[in-house]
Image (cartoon, rainbow, N blue to C red):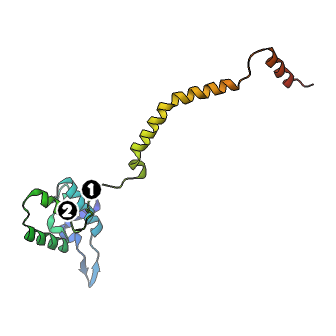
Amino acid sequence: MRAALRQLCKHGVDALRAQKVNDKWRKPNVSKRVAADLRKLAIRNGTYGQFDTETGVGWNPAWDAPERKKKDDLEHRTNKADDAMAADNLLLMGSNQGGIQSIRPPKETKRERTRESRAQKIEDLLAQADEKIEEYRKEQEGKKPKLGIEEEFKRAMKSSSW
């Protein structure tokens, strides 16, 4: 279990808030970036709305940032969207109301993204491999000297020390 999840299990919403101790502010135990990652993970896994303190799975909507709650409440009041599809879209969009959704599939590495094209390229080259091997062998055989007495005599003359 991640340290952030342990802090959320132990302290709840207080782990997400800064605390004033002895007239000095202490940063929250769970940063906003990590909290956003945990929230998105809960949305992806379908555990948004409930939080299990024993396993650390899920996200409690009461932990959302106040500005996020205001936008969600405002849209619920104006739209009165009862169907599940609209609610899911609203949940996925989060605070980003623009055209790009806040939850995207991971970008992955270039190697993972180009895997299919590389596999196709390899298959095409393997289909041509037998022809290329045969052509190479014929070429190498053509480079060899022809058998006969003349070639044997030339070879003997080259190696002699006259």
Image-quadrant location for residue 41: bottom left
Per the model, the C-alpha gap separating discs 1 and 2 is: 11 Å
Residue 85 coordinates in the image, percent (x, y): 13, 57
Residue that appears at 74% across and 16% down: 147
Q: Quadrant of the N terminus?
A: bottom left
Residue 56 visible at all: no
Q: Amino acid at mark 1?
A: Met
Q: Which residue is mark 1?
A: 1
Residue 13 coordinates in the image, percent (x, y): 18, 69
Secondary element type, mark 1: loop
- Reading the chain from its start, which is encountered first: label 1 or label 2? 1
Q: Which residue is mark 2?
A: 9
Work out whether residue 109 or residue 56 is closer to the camera in this orientation and state it: 109
Image-quadrant location for residue 120: top left
Q: Residue furthest top?
A: 149
Residue that appears at 6% across and 66% down: 80
Work out whether residue 49 or residue 142 is closer to the camera in this orientation and state it: 142
Q: Amino acid at mark 2?
A: Cys
Q: Quadrant of the C terminus?
A: top right
Mark 1 and mark 2 residues within 8 Å of each other at the beta carbon:
yes
Q: Residue furthest right?
A: 162
Residue 27 coordinates in the image, percent (x, y): 29, 75
Residue that appears at 8% across and 71% down: 77
Secondary element type, mark 2: helix
**Total labels drawn:** 2
Work out whether residue 46 or residue 136 is closer to the camera in this orientation and state it: 136
